[in-house]
Amino acid sequence: MIDKQAIKEHVRGILIALGDDPDREGLAETPERVANMYEEMFDGMNYTNQDIAEMFSKTFDIKSQSTDMVIVRDIEIFSHCEHHLSLMYDMKVSVAYLPKGKVLGLSKVARIADLAAKRLQLQERIGSDIADIIAIAACTEDVAVYIEGKHSCMSSRGIKKSSSLTQSSTLRGRFRDDMALQSRFYMQLKG
């Protein structure tokens, strides 16, 4: 569980370290506000991938062919880089999987992506986590995840390249091994 009291104490210390007065009017409630915000923004840290899969494993039986593909595109998420605690923003996730007699409720795919991102993360790990969770929840190893987003550690500090866009993909099962299926997935992203 997230320790809000420790966050408040540390934020107060950061304000002092920045040379400001944490007791002045504009900052007096900042440590509590930040602790509340962190509790919401990092909610995914309270759960393992297995926990998330169990939370969002509502499926529906279908008569599926082995080539059927479910794809949910452009799921908006945000996360925080574990290297600088900086925001990863304007992120869009697309998830595809091949059902094996069951499909997930569509909102479950978006909820999985959202909660997996609410951790201190790397973009590549977000994709891997989403793929792992979808594989468990949908009972299929055939999963593909594509993510694109901007990173404030690139846009607002360091190299300061505000238009840079990071793209990553995670391919599992047949999406990794079947080039025709992989090509179908990437063509759907252009849709």
Image (cartoon, grey):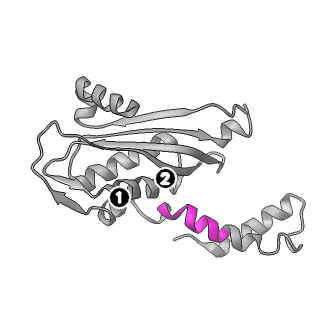
- Kind of element beneath mark 2: helix
Q: How far apart in space, not on screen, are marks 1 and 2 (Cα)?
A: 16 Å
Question: Which amino acid type is marked by label 2?
Answer: Ala
Mark 1 vs mark 2: give the one in front: 1
Q: For this view, does 143 lie left or right of residue 39?
A: left
- Quarter of the image with the C terminus is top left
What residue is shown at x 49% (from left), y 53% (from top)? 117
Instruction: Identify the amino acid type marked 1.
Output: Ser
Instruction: Sort mark 2 into few (<14), some (14-19) or many (20+) by Cα contacts within 10 Å.
Output: many
Is 134 placed above or below 44 here? above
Q: Residue at x 83, y 70 (%)?
A: 27
Please tell me in which quadrant of the rendered image residue 8 appears.
Answer: bottom right
- Identify the residue under disc 1: 107
Label 1: which secondary element: helix
Q: Residue at x 19, y 47 (%)?
A: 99
Q: Position of residue 139 (x, y in %)?
A: 20, 52
Q: Is residue 162 left or right of residue 70?
A: right
**Can you identify the residue that label 2 sits on?**
117
Of 68 and 13, the residue lying toward us: 68
The stretch drawn in magenta includes residue 121: no
Q: Is residue 87 above or below residue 16?
A: above
Residue 66 placed where, x, y %? 13, 39
In this picture, which residue range is highlighted in magenta? 35-44
Return the disc, 1 or 2, that comes first in the chain's sequence: 1
The residue lying at 37 percent from left, 57 percent from top is 49
Give the x, y percent position of residue 50: 33, 59
Foreground of the two, 126 or 76: 76
